[in-house]
Image (tube, grey):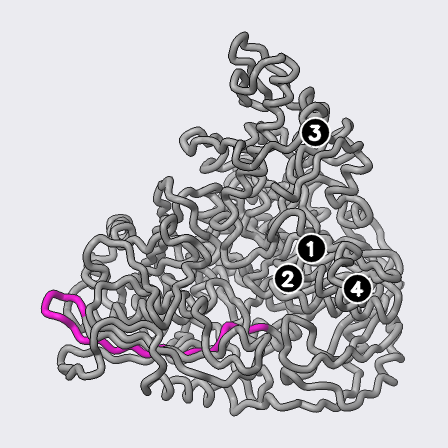
Amino acid sequence: MIRLTINNKPVELDVEPDMPLLYALRDELQLTGTKFGCGSGLCGACTVHMDGQPIRSCVMPVSAVADKAITTIEGLSENADHHIQNAWREFKVPQCGYCQNGQMMSAAALIASNNNPSDEDIDSSMQGNICRCGTYQRIRQAIKTAAKNLREEV
Amino acid sequence: MDNQTIQNVGRRNFLKATGLTGGAFILGATLPMGCSVEETGAAQHEINFFVSIAKDGQVTIVNHRSEMGQGIKTSVPQIIADELEADWDLVSVIQAKGDAKYGPQSTGGSASIRTYFTYIRQMGATARDMLEQAAANIWKVDKSQVKAQGHAVLNLANGQTIGYGDLAIHAANLPVPEKDSVKLKDIKDFNLIGKDVKLVDLDTMVAGKMQYAHDIQLPDMLIASIERPPVVGGKVKSFDATEAKKVKGVVDVIRLKDRGLPSNLLPLSGVAVLATNTWAALQGRKKLKIEWDHGTLIDEGSNDYQQKLKEKVNTKGITVRNEGDIDNHQYNPDKTVEATYSVPYIHHASMETPAATAHVKGDTCTVWTGTQSPQRVQSQAAEEIGLSKEEVHKVEVNQTTMGGAFGRKSKGDFAIEAVELSKATGKPVKVVWSREDDVKHGFYHSVSANYFKAELTDNGSADNWVMRNAYPPISWLWNLEAEFPSDGALSLGYADIPFEIKNLNIEKHKVKSYVRPGWVRSVACINNGFALGSFVDELAVKAGISTHQMWLNLLGSDRMVDPSGPNFKYSNYGLDLKDHPIDTKRIKSLMNLLAEKAPINEETAEGEGWGISFLRSFGSFVAAATKARVVDNKVTILEMHTAVDCGIGVSPDRIKAQMEGAIVYSLSIALMGEITTKDGIVEQGNFHDYPVLRINQTPKMFVHLVESDAPPGGIGEPGVPPVIPSITNAIYHASGIRIRDLPVSKVLSV
């Protein structure tokens, strides 16, 4: 039995210890907002936060997240009103939307650690997240706006 | 409108009619505009298959086309709501199941709006007409005395209004008006078409709650992972599942049936591991021991194959289109440009890999999947479980939004795999494809070679123009004897070149096929557009004029081009040439707009350069410009523009989004994407060896949209073909390095 916290709730998982967190979230806990994209940590669709840091849940065995605090897209905000989510709506970022949960999780982690990211900072933090619809330019714009709104709030 | 029925249905029946029963709790009964069925409260009255109105005035519109990121789930209801004179804030949208009553649902070829604009408008207009008739009946006046506006019908004589909610039950009981008697709105009166309305699924997506085929979960469902034959047409010789079955969670191992060749759009064979969770299925699959019979399609390797295509197009082919006399022309070598271009196999690589869930119960079947062709999945699933053509209604296809598709999900093979396995186990089965499955067992854009030769004329144009191409045709999927592209395929940016050339020969070549070919975003316009755009640039360089000027010179006088001839029937993407002409004036005007918006003709810094190109495809006109820098053999893309004239644009922001997306998709194709085969087996497997564009490689980009009231053209695909050569042309003008073989990463660092 592996104990951890997911979206501020204590969770016990009775799964194989080598099962990647992605499948535990999706198949066992019905938290399907975290997406499968590559299974190899190459595309970022499965990004969640572990103790606030972005990780690729498809290559993270549940044994490695024991006693950790995991946040998924479902736990990013109460009412889908995180600065990142607000900016994602403002710039109409999603097309198919499939990669966007991972994009938003990476972006939320970025502005939490850097509330005034440059283009280079954004490129560096977001290059692990692939979008095949090609929403990158709007992602850049949305992150800058979200960071600005975050700065003004502080 | 023959397929309409008029009925007054209660909420329960409405739910049944519109696809929210059964799987509703799984798919989430939340309607996309943030309003749940429960909250709408009142009874829904179905005016026609597309429009239902509740007593409280809430309008529900069915989107019958497949959403894959292009925004059609907003655009179709937006068109209907405009003709309906509905208030967008009072509109909810639900996704149709696969059902012939809606008319064609196959979503590809950028066709939803360009082909069905009038049909979709009629759906809204018919409902509006019935609401007007209902109000006229209540007031006992002629219908000409009333007018729908602002979600109500107005009595022109006395200014009274009746809201749609109050009219709904009356309208639903009226006979359907004759199609010809329903008047469509004047274009100038559009109040939603051409405006950016609230996107239907935006809030759901941003909340992380959008559900895709991978997300379907049913009680007692098994999850299947399938090891498929490495070579198309191969089959399992023998297999040992002993170790696989020992994996905790693995429930069953099933050999799929051999379906042989031609492959059609059906599953390959293979061995499926079924488990209670995805990880167990994947682990069990790793422990399978399979001996394969690779079959007959073992190739010489795609590199050698492509080399043969390039040699082939340097020899005379079979004439498709001929003008003047070219055979006896003596070319002046100082004025002649001759070039051969090639494009490798390309894969869709949508972020969401294929996935489908099926539950076969007796002679019925329910499918949940993201498909570009729900009716094809329905008919193939029916056949799979032994139903006749008349019994297709026993298969219910629930359509999820797709996590990208780009043509891959026009093929429902993955759904039929789920049906086959559910039938075998009697349980609901979800088939999920790994990324490796997706990359290795795709339907690829065909490897191709295009040849050009032409001689410059004294007036800065070119003549004695020869074009040849060779690539495996998509029709091979159904017919192993198919060796040539169809006229429809040759109409894709190839035999339809709009240039004013006196002596012209366009030829095709016959080829042999190996891997499964398929439609990838813009199809053969990828290779034809790349070759054409590159060649015009090469002519301009030879002539010492700007590429922009060379395009204008080649296009020549203002005229409408009809490329059909004795050996070739131009398909024009299924559109009528009268409504959607190849209009050279419109092309030149767009090229000039591009030159105005992007400084393509200005001097650039050392190591930098602009490239441009154009292609009319899927009924739309798109010109593209790219600025690139090449330093120490490293390419940096600095800035990109597309100018688009698509006629009437329904959702301007989504048009821009599609153009931005096409830029990114094209950068992947031009710079880095390449599928190769060895012995008929695809060598790539994931994003490390089939790289796609990332944010750090993305330039700033601008989209310039021409306002027009011409009939609408397509949008999903036309952004791709001109962008690719604009990139390679920019690299040439920055560095002098001419890229004739994609991707650029073969010779330069990207």
- Label 3: element kind: helix
Q: Chain of mark 1?
A: B
Q: Check the residue under mark 3 and report the chain it is in.
A: B
Q: Mark 2 or mark 4, which has the lower sequence index?
A: 2
Give the label on residue B457, or none.
none
CA distance for labels 4 and 1: 28 Å
Q: Give the residue number, with chain letter if any, for mark 2.
A: B352
Label 3: which residue?
A: B172
Q: Amino acid at mark 3?
A: Ala
The magenta stretch spans which residues?
A: B443-462
Residue drawn at the location 47% of the way across and 87% of the way down:
B305
- Which of pointers 3 and 1 lies earlier in the amino acid sequence? 3
Vertical placement of B181 versus A106: above or below? above
Q: Are marks 2 and 4 in contact (CB under 8 Å)?
A: no
Q: Is residue A76 magenta?
A: no
Same chain under badges 2 and 4? The reply is yes
Q: Earlier in the sequence, mark 3 or mark 4?
A: 3
Q: Secondary structure at mark 4?
A: loop
Q: In the image, which disc is placed on residue B212? A: 1
Mark found first going from the N terminus, 1 or 2? 1
Residue reaching furthest left? B458
Query: Do discs 3 and 2 belong to a common subunit?
Result: yes
Q: Which residue is mark 4?
A: B387
Q: Kindly check if marks 3 and 1 are in contact, taking CB atoms under 8 A apart as contact.
A: no
Q: Amino acid at mark 1?
A: Tyr
Q: Residues within 10 Å of mark 2 (few under 14, many from 20)?
A: many
Q: Residue at x 40, y 48 (%)?
A: B646
